[in-house]
Amino acid sequence: MLVAPSILSANFAQLGNEINAICDASCDLIHIDVMDGYFVPNMTIGPVVVNSVAKVASKPLDIHLMVDNNNFFIDLFAHLKPKYISFHIESENHPHRIIQKLKSLNIKPAIVLNPHTKPDTIEYLLEDLDMVLLMSVNPGFGGQKFIPSVLKKIKELKQMINKINPKCLIQVDGGVNETNIKVLKEAGVDIIVAGSYVFKSNDYTKAIKSLKK
């Protein structure tokens, strides 16, 4: 299990130290939630902060766009060469075009599904994806509780991936902790995003290790 702490739950007054701490604690990716206040009812960070994170980070960036204009935001962050940029299928009329753009930039493309969106919505795109991110909370705010019905969706998606593109990874974001990590792994999850569980703990190394087990 790979662990991608979401800096949405970090102490932004000490953001550089927080980034160093999770990297030292053996995280695998640094998950960055970019929200525009339109697609979701919240605004987070822009290029100035993300540029600063990239300068400090010793682990790859995993940028999650929760925005209406994916093209615009990809252009803002492409020069940072994140490992993944994920965008919501619900916000994009031309997802295949966005996927090809990311590939041309040597960035691994990923699509995000909100809790209500069915996996078959992206069946025709799976062969071109490196990752699918399933939201297990409603996007926009950290610290929410895991939605149990997402487990069924993970299993459905895993079956599709096995048939179409076995190399495509499944990431889950929202309400992940030590009580549900085992069932997530059994359902087929490869990467989990953990915000509050890591950053609200007293020991980042211990928190991350508990998820990797």
Image: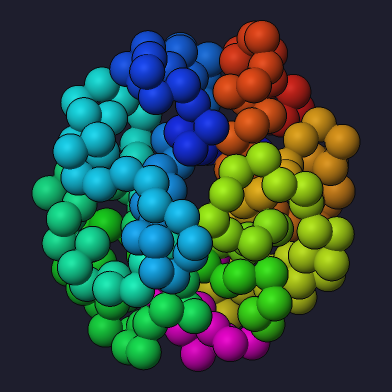
Indicate left or right for 209 with 44 as reference.
right
Which portion, as a residue range, is magenta? 119-132
Whether residue 79 sits left or right of residue 24 in the image: it is: left
Quadrant of the frame with the C terminus = top right
Tell me where residue 57 appears, x and y as whole percent. Answer: 31, 25
Determine whether, in the image, residue 210 is placed left or right of residue 149: left
Tell me what residue is drawn at x 32 percent, y 17 percent: 16
Q: Residue at x 25, y 47 (%)?
A: 46
The chief SS type of the magenta part is: helix
Q: Residue at x 48, y 37 (%)?
A: 8
Place residue 39 in its image quadrant.
bottom left
* Residue 190 visible in the shown view: no
Left or right: residue 11 versus residue 79 is right
Query: Is 122 drawn above or below residue 21 in the view shown?
Result: below
In reply to whether residue 22 is colored magenta, the answer given is no
162 is higher (above) or lower (below) than 175: below
Would you say residue 113 is visible in this rendering?
yes
Where the N terminus falls, by quadrant?
Answer: top right
Residue 146 on image: x %, y %: 78, 51
Q: How far across and down, in percent of the image, does residue 140 sit?
A: 54, 56
Residue pictured at 64% horizontal, 21% vertical? 200
Q: Residue 30 at x, y = what percent?
A: 42, 35
Q: Is residue 125 magenta?
A: yes
The number of discs equals 0
Coloring applied to the structure: rainbow
User: What is the quadrant of residue 147 in the picture?
Assistant: bottom right
Which sits in the foreground, 65 or 78? 65
Vertical position of residue 152 compared to residue 190: above or below? below
